[in-house]
Amino acid sequence: MAGQLEGKVAVVTGGASGIGRAIAELYAREGATVVVADLNEQAAKDVAASLAAAAQEHAAYAVDVTDAESTKSLAETVVSDLGRIDILVNSAGILTEIPFTELTPADFDKMIAVDLRSVFLCSRWVAPYMIQQGWGRIINIASQIGLKGGTGLAHYAAAKAGVIGMTKSMARELAEHNVLVNAIAPGPIVTPLLGDLSDEWRAEKQAELPLGRFGTAEEVAPTALLLASSPGGDLYMGQTLGPNSGDVMP
Ligand code: NAD
């Protein structure tokens, strides 16, 4: 049986780890040619190689999503090498926990660069190719923190709230070109990203969760498949879906 993403080219930033990796793996199983784009070039190559063993050839690119030239070159090189970009998943990100009164301007700027400006840059360079094709799907990985806030996470919340606002605006502008833009705002998911957070935060968070446990990256990936697939995802635009949050998103 043909996969749901047969013939599609999908670029997954942050695809070398965690949620991005699980999405890359599911997309590959569904027949997409996947470009694993990550700052960690070796890990991106390893993931792309592991995908290739399961299906067709995939690719790895080193990218710094905070850098305008690096992201532009990613889009241009993928189109030159593979002919198109149908799906962009903006999953690259970082998380630091810093009390507000200790947060420095440099901490704040770094978070905005990696978790928000990155989504602008990657989408900005990829969207024109999607418009030209008359089909595209952009999926931004936001966070519940962007909707609810979090202690020690003002900078992260600002970046993720920005991602949600930008998603809604991009969705309005690009829908007429059949380029649909949505965000996923997961609750806590077990990945290396959570490694540095305090035990206190983890315990408090776990108690709030309806399932009483953190989610897995593999449990988030099917939402990204829904939003990338046709006809399954064809009516979603400007939405924020929230796996492992207990919320029904508008
Ligand atoms: P992760 O640390 O497992 O993966 C993040 C990936 O992004 C890594 O491979 C890293 O190398 C890459 N990356 C970091 N900076 C980069 C840069 N400048 N350029 C290119 N790549 C870069 O984390 P994850 O949990 O899979 O997080 C993925 C996304 O999901 C992030 O945007 C994160 O904020 C979001 N998120 C995570 C959780 C969670 O609980 N894990 C919850 C909600 C949202």
Image (spheres, helix red, strand yellow):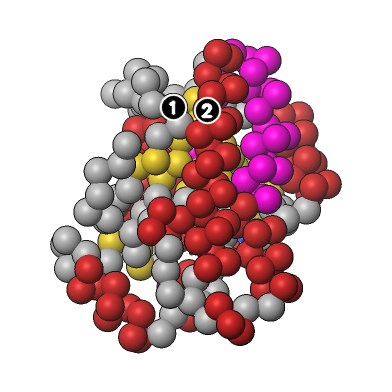
Q: Height in image: 102 above or below 110?
A: below
The stretch of residues the image draws in magenta is: 117-139
Crowding near the residue tagged with mark 2, few <14, some 14–19, many ≥20 C-alpha atoms within 10 Å = many
Q: Height in image: 121 above or below 131?
A: below
Q: Height in image: 93 above or below 161?
A: below
Label 1 beta carbon less than 8 Å to ligand 1: no
On the question of residue 10 being in view, the answer is no
Nearest the viewer among 163 and 193 is 163
Query: What is the three-letter code of the residue carrying label 2?
Result: Ala
| Side of 136 relative to 28 (left or right) | right
Query: What is the three-letter code of the residue carrying label 1?
Result: Met
Could you tell me which quadrant the N terminus lies in?
top left
The label on residue 171 is: 2
Q: Which residue is mark 1?
A: 237
Residue found 55% across the figure and 78% down from its top: 100
**Farthest right residue in view:** 69
